[in-house]
Image: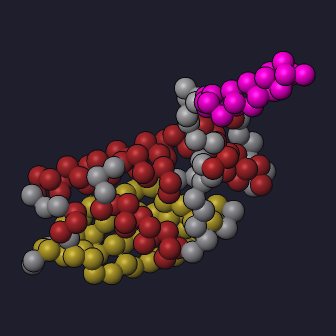
């Protein structure tokens, strides 16, 4: 009987003095389901968010304003357009890389002028809506900035895909004389 009590007390005491180890994954990447594309239903919200992104010097954050591959594929399926999966990927990458290239050009032009984007005074945004023969909607968006006596505009095309707005093409900086 004493031996049984001794073993039980030893068993319970070992639980108090032992430490459990927590297994930590070596690859701690975030869950892919949490990376959903950002969808903008209103154009002014897209423009404000895009203006905020422009103030950062990070060209990789443009991907939040471009439709991802799955969304483009879904859009092409909805419009009954016959695109292969590799063509959809190429189309999405062309849009993304083109906008990133244009953004880097804007940064280089501002650096050459000795102007920091954060120092530009934001004046207004103007919109010119339109649609093509296939009833696809788009908008020419122009952000107006000023610094001292100089006036600047940044313009781009915003497009509608399945009732959501995205930045499409032709991101450029112009100096207004």
Q: In front: 32, or 100?
A: 32
Looking at the rendering, in which quadrant would you find the N terminus? top right
x%, y% of residue 7? 80, 21
Q: In front: 14, or 146?
A: 14
x%, y% of residue 164? 63, 65
Among all residues in the image, which is located at the extreme top? 3
Among all residues in the image, which is located at the extreme right? 1
Left or right of residue 37, residue 122 in this image:
left
Left or right of residue 159, residue 47 in this image:
left
x%, y% of residue 68? 59, 47
Is any part of residue 176 visible from this angle? Answer: no
Q: Main secondary structure of the magenta part?
A: helix
- Give the quarter of the image for residue 122: bottom left
x%, y% of residue 131? 59, 70
Instruction: Name the residue located 31 percent from the left edge and 57 percent from the top edge.
Output: 56
58 is higher (above) or lower (below) than 52: above
Magenta range is 1-23
Looking at the rendering, in which quadrant would you find the C terminus? bottom left
Q: Which colour scheme is used?
A: secondary structure
64 is higher (above) or lower (below) than 47: above
Left or right of residue 25, residue 58 in this image:
left
Instruction: Name the residue located 64 percent from the left edge and 42 percent from the top edge.
Output: 32
Is any part of residue 39 visible from this angle? Answer: yes
Instruction: Name the residue located 77 percent from the left edge and 55 percent from the top edge.
Output: 78
Q: In front: 22, or 7?
A: 7
Instruction: Name the residue located 36 percent from the left edge and 48 percent from the top edge.
Output: 59
Left or right of residue 83, residue 128 in this image:
left
Magenta segment includes 164:
no
- Give the quarter of the image for residue 9: top right
């Amino acid at each position: 009987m004493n031996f049984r009590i001794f073993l039980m007390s030893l068993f319970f005491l070992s639980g108090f003095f032992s430490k459990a180890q927590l297994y930590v994954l070596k690859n701690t990447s975030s869950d892919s389901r949490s990376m959903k594309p950002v969808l903008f239903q209103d154009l002014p919200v897209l423009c404000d968010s895009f203006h905020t992104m422009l103030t950062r010097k990070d060209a990789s954050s443009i991907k939040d304003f471009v439709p991802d591959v799955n969304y483009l594929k879904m859009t092409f399926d909805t419009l009954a357009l016959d695109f292969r999966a590799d063509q959809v990927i190429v189309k999405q990458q062309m849009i993304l890389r083109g906008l990133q290239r244009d953004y880097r050009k804007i940064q280089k032009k501002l650096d050459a002028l000795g102007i920091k984007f954060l120092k530009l005074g934001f004046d207004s945004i103007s919109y010119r809506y339109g649609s093509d023969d296939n009833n696809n909607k788009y908008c020419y968006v122009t952000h107006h900035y000023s610094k001292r006596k100089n006036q600047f505009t940044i313009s781009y095309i915003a497009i509608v895909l399945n009732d959501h707005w995205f930045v499409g093409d032709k991101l450029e900086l112009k100096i207004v004389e």
